Image (spheres, rainbow, N blue to C red):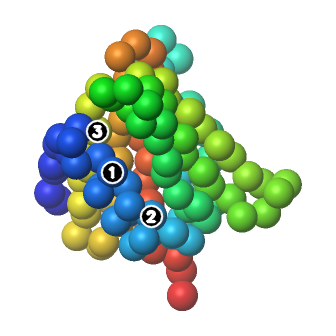
Amino acid sequence: MKNDNIPADHWTEFFDQLNHDRTGWLATIQVLHARYGPQNIAVDLPFEGISFDTKGSRASSIEISAGSNPERHVNHVVDLPLHIRQTRESDSSIDVQIEPASGPVTLIHLAAPVQ
């Protein structure tokens, strides 16, 4: 397992690479709420990508998309992200943690699709 903090000035590169390498992988998106615990937003939906608003000097929001089927599609937005961390697992899966200025942390787990 390898943990990395992603510096803000590398977010564009990180998301571009993640979108290029992991589109179609199975995405589980959780909100880690301090009061209510982990809340699933999506479970094992095809990862469609991550984009963010770069107006001004900092990203003001990050949008995560999963699910290629209109009946099972999720867009999750994280406002005012401060920190992004990734953990790479030995099975090639990856976890991305997005910590906002306020509110719950979002965790994205990406696993290779079953062949």
Q: Which mark is residue 84?
A: 3
Q: Quadrant of the C terminus?
A: bottom right
Report if residue 32 is visible in the image: no
Q: Nearer the viewer, residue 92 or 76?
A: 76
Q: Quadrant of residue 22?
A: bottom left
- Looking at the rendered structure, the kind of residue marked 3 is Ile
Vertical side of 4 occupied by 34: above or below: above
User: SS of the residue at dot 1?
Assistant: helix
- Residue depicted at 21% across the width and 42% down the height: 9
Report if residue 86 is visible in the image: yes
Residue 18, image x and y in percent?
Answer: 38, 62
The local crowd at label 2, few if under 14, some if 14 to 19, many if 20 or more residues have their Cα within 10 Å, is: some
Vertical side of 82 occupied by 68: above or below: below
Q: Which residue is mark 1?
A: 12
Q: CA distance from mark 3 to mark 1?
A: 12 Å
Q: Quadrant of residue 110?
A: bottom left
Q: CA distance from mark 3 to mark 2?
A: 15 Å
- Looking at the rendered structure, the kind of residue marked 1 is Thr
Earlier-in-chain disc, 3 versus 1: 1
Q: Which mark is residue 19?
A: 2
Earlier-in-chain disc, 2 versus 1: 1
- Looking at the rendered structure, the kind of residue marked 2 is Asn
Q: Quadrant of the N terminus?
A: bottom left
Q: Which mark is residue 107?
A: none
The local crowd at label 3, few if under 14, some if 14 to 19, many if 20 or more residues have their Cα within 10 Å, is: many
Using residue 27 as the reference point, say whether residue 66 is left or right of it: right
- Residue depicted at 42% across the width and 71% down the height: 20
Q: Nearer the viewer, residue 64 or 36?
A: 64
Earlier-in-chain disc, 3 versus 2: 2
